[in-house]
Amino acid sequence: MITLGGPTKRVRWRVLNDWGVRVGAIMLLIVVGIAFFGSLLSSQSPYETAGIPGASPGGGHLLGLDFEGRDVLARLLHGGSSTIILATTATIVLYVVAISVGLLAGYSKSVIDPLLMRGVDVLLSVPSLLVMLLFITGLGSSKPVLVLAAVIVLFPGAARIVRSATLEVSTRGFVEAAVARGENTVAILRREVLPNIIPPIVADLGLRFSWSIILIASVNFLGLGIKPPSPDWGVMISENLVTLSSNPWAVIAPALMIGLLIIAVNLMGDGVVRQLGTSGAGR
Amino acid sequence: MTSHDQLALELHEIRIELSNGACVVDGVTFSVRAGEIVGLVGESGSGKTTTALSIFGYTGSGLRCVGGEVVLAGETLDTPASFRRARGRLASYVPQNPGTALNPSLRIGAAIDDIINDHRHDQERRTRLLQSVELPGDRQFALRFPHQLSGGQQQRVCIAGAIAKKPSLVVLDEPTTGLDVITQDRILKELLRLRDEEHVAMLYITHDLAVAAQIADTIAVMYAGELVEFGPAAQVLRDPRHPYTRGLMASTPDHARGRKLEVMKGAAVGVGERPAGCSFAPRCQQATVLCASEHPSLNAEIPGRLVRCPEWRHTPPMKWSQESYVTDEQRRSDPLPTVLDVEHLRVEYPGRRSASVAVENVSFQLERSGCVALVGESGSGKTTIARVVAGLHPIASGRVILDGAPMADYARKRTIEQRRRVQIVFQNPVEALNPRYSVEAAIARPAHLLRGLNAKEANAEVARLLEAVRLPASLAKRYPRELSGGECQRVAIARALAASPDVLVCDEVTSALDVSVQAVVLDLLRELRTELGLAILFITHDLGVVATVADRVLVLQHGIICEENTTHSILSDPQHDYTKALLAAAPSLSASIEAWESGTGLRSLDEALLGGES
C-alpha cells in the first residue's frame, strides 16, 4: 500500500483548527471528565441521606439535597457515566449496522435495496419512544436491551443517510474504474465509496448520538431504564421533579449536563463537516 | 428598436475584482452595433461570462465591479435602479443550460407571459413570439412543461423570452454548448436570421472558435481577464495577430482539414497569479525580454482591429496543412494484428415492461496502434459500447473478443489478464479520480492489482507514467482537488496506462476540457499509440476531434451503425444521409475561412462592417 502523505495531515490540521471542533472538544472533555472522574472528587455518598429532602444549596451541599435528602452534587458526579456509556455504545453499534446495510443497499442496485428500504420505512412509521418501550417491556430493562432498543429506533434514519450518500458516490467515474479493473465489492465499498461518504455520516453522527442520549434519558426518566436508587442524570431529572420548587438545582444540574454533552458533540460534528465537506463528496 | 447607426452596447474600462483585490476582468472596452453579432471567445477562467454579466450590473458572489461604464442603447447605467430597469428591456440574457434556466413548474405559455409581463394572456403576441423562433405557437404547445421539450426547443423558448421585449442587445452565454451539432446548427441559423430580419444585436459567448466563425461578425478574444484581440471576424480569423488567438485556432480540431494540432505550452494563468508583464508571455513563442516586464496595451496599428501584443508583426500565419488526415499517412502497408473484435453486439437496458435496445448488431475490429472512433449524437449508444468493452454493462447477444478469446460481460468475471489489457478513461475528469487518494495512490493501484507490482515497483512506475502523460513528478503527492481539469484527465490516462493495456477505451475524454488542453490530451494519445502500440476506441460527438485522432470512423444512429469507413472517406465523401447531415451541421473553422476567401460567405452584413461605417 502507498501511504497517504501531506494533504491528509493538512486536512487533520484543518479539522483541529476549526473553532467548533475546539469549543466542542473542550466542552466534551469537561462533561466526560465530570461523568467518569467526578466520583473521585466527591467526598459524599450518592446513596446516603444527608439532610432534609429538597434542601436548597448551602451547608456543604453545593447543589443542595434531592427529594430523598441525598447530596445532589455527589449524585451528579456519579450519575453521568451510565448515560454516556450507553449512548456511545448505541451509536457505535448503530453505525456499524447502518453503514453495512446502507452501503450494501445503495451500491447493490439489486433486490436487496427495495427490501431493506421498505423494512426501514416500516420502522420509521412507528413512534420511536413506543418502539423502545415495547422492547423494554418485552425483554426487560437490562443495559443490553436499552442499547439494542436505541439502535433499532435510530437505525432507519441512519441507514437512509448512508444509502443515499452511497447511491450518489457509486455512479462516479472512480467507482466505475474500480469495477472495470475487477476490484471485489468489499474493496470498492471500503476503498472507493466509504471514504467519500464520511462527511454526511459525521454530520449525522452528532445528531444520532444526541438522539440516543435523549432516548436513553427519556426511558430513564420514565423509570423504565436504569432503576433508582442508582444515580443517573435522566433518573435524577425525573425523580427530583417533586422537589422542583424547593431545590430546582437537582433538576437543572443534570439537565444542563445532558444539554452540554449534546451541544459539544454536535459542535464537533458540524466542525468536522465544515472542514471535510469542501473537499469531499456527498456534501 | 434602435436605429442602425446607434451602438447597442458600449463597455468602457470594465474592471471586476475579487474581494481580496485580485483582478478578474481588467479594463475591458468594446462596443456592439445594432444588428451585429460579437463573438466573445476565451477559455474557462478568461473572464468572458463575468464581463457579460457586468452588462446587467451583476457580479457573481465574491466579486465586485470597481470601475467602468456600461452604456446600453445610449443610456448610461450607473445605479442599481438603472440596471434593474434596463434588464429585459435594453438587454437580455440567454444562459448556457436551458434545462435549468426554465422554471420546471411553469408551462411554456405562462413562462413567456411572465416575461412579456402580460397577465391578460395576450395569446396572439405570445404566438407571434414563439413562431418567431420557429416553435409551434399553438395552445397545445403553450401548455407544455419545460421537461416535455427537447434541449433545442428549450433553448428556443429561452431565446424567445430574451427577444420578447425587443431589447437592443441579447447576451448569449454558450447557448449551444450542451446541444447536439444538428440542433446547434439550427439554433445558430435561427440567431443569424434574427439578426438579419429583426436587427437584434448579440453578444455571443463561446469557447469554440469554429462556432464563433460561423456566427460572429466581430470577434473579441479574452485571455486572463483582458481583451487581447478585437476585430472583424473575417480579418481576425484569416490572419490572427495575437499569438493567443493563433494558438487557439491551431489547437481547434477541424473536420474539414484534419491535421496535427499545435500545442500551446504551459497552462492558462489563474486569477491572482497573473504575471507583471504580458499575461500570455510565459506561454508565448515570440515573447521578448520586454514582454515579461512591461504590460502591453491594446494597439490599433491595423485599421479596424485591436491587438494586445507589441510583437504582433511576428505572429506566424496560420498554417492549414494541405495534406489532411495525418493518421492516414501513418498507416503501414502490412496490416497490423487485430486486438479487439466486436461481433454483432446487441445491448439492452432493462425497462418496466420490455427491455429497450441501446445497441443493435454492431461489429468492428480494432488493430494494434489503431484508433477507431464511434461518432453519434447523445443517445446513439456510443457510450454504451464503451461500457460493454470495459466490462461495465452486460451483453444481450454478440461477442467481444480480445486476441481471439471472447470476454465475459462483467469485468469481475474476466481473467485478470483481460482486465489488464482493456482500460477505460471517462468523460468527467474530476469525477474520475477518488478525491480521497493522492495521484500516486490512484496510479499505483492498477499497477499493484493487475500487474502484481509491489509498493516500491509501483512507485517507480508512477514516476514513469507521470512522465509519459507529460506531468511533473511533483504532482504525485497531490490530491485531485489540487489539479486542473486537464491535469486530472492526464492522471486518469496515467492510471489506465498503469495496467499497461493494449486497448484504451476513451469515452468523450476531451469534451469537458478547454480546446488548448484538449489539444494536449489528443496529442498525448497520438504519441502513446506509436510509442506503446496502444489501440484506442475513441468515443466522441465532435467530428473535428475524429479528424485529429482516428483511422476509422463508425457513425452510430439510434444504436445502429449507419456508416463505417476510413476517417478520410467519411469526412470527405459521406454516403449516408445522417453522416451528411452531421458533417453539414458541424462547424468548421477552415470552412468558414475558405468561405470568406472565396467571397461566398453568407454574411452580407459582414462585408458592410468590413467596409467601415459607410
Image (tube, coloured by chain):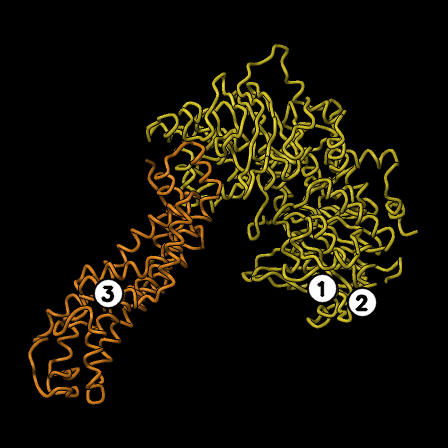
Q: Amino acid under label 2?
A: Asp
What shade has chain A been given? orange
Task: Give me the C-alpha separation between circle 1 and circle 2.
Answer: 11 Å
Compared to residue B91, the image places residue A174 above or below, namely: above
The image position of residue A70, as x and y in percent, is: 11, 81
One can see residue A139 in this view: yes
> Chain letter of disc 1?
B
What shade has chain B been given? yellow
User: What number is the disc on residue B215?
Assistant: none
The image position of residue B401, as x and y in percent, is: 51, 21
Q: Amino acid under label 3?
A: Leu
Q: Residue at x 77, y 39 (%)?
A: B237
Q: Amino acid under label 1?
A: Ala
Residue on which the image places disc 2: B122
One can see residue B27 in this view: no
Element under label 3?
helix
Q: Are marks 3 and 1 on the same chain?
A: no
Q: Residues within 10 Å of mark 3 (few under 14, many from 20)?
A: some
Task: Specify the quadrant of the image occupied by residue A69.
Answer: bottom left
Q: Nearer the viewer, residue A127 or B578?
A: A127
Quadrant where the N terminus of chain B is found in the figure: bottom right
The image position of residue B163, as x and y in percent, is: 78, 59
> Chain letter of disc 3?
A
Task: Give me the C-alpha separation between circle 3 and circle 1.
Answer: 59 Å
Q: In the drawing, does residue B370 fall left or right of residue B394?
A: right
User: What number is the disc on residue B110?
Assistant: 1
Compared to residue B37, the image places residue B441 above or below, namely: above
Task: Specify the quadrant of the image occupied by residue B20.
Answer: bottom right
> Which residue occupies the extreme top position in the image?
B334
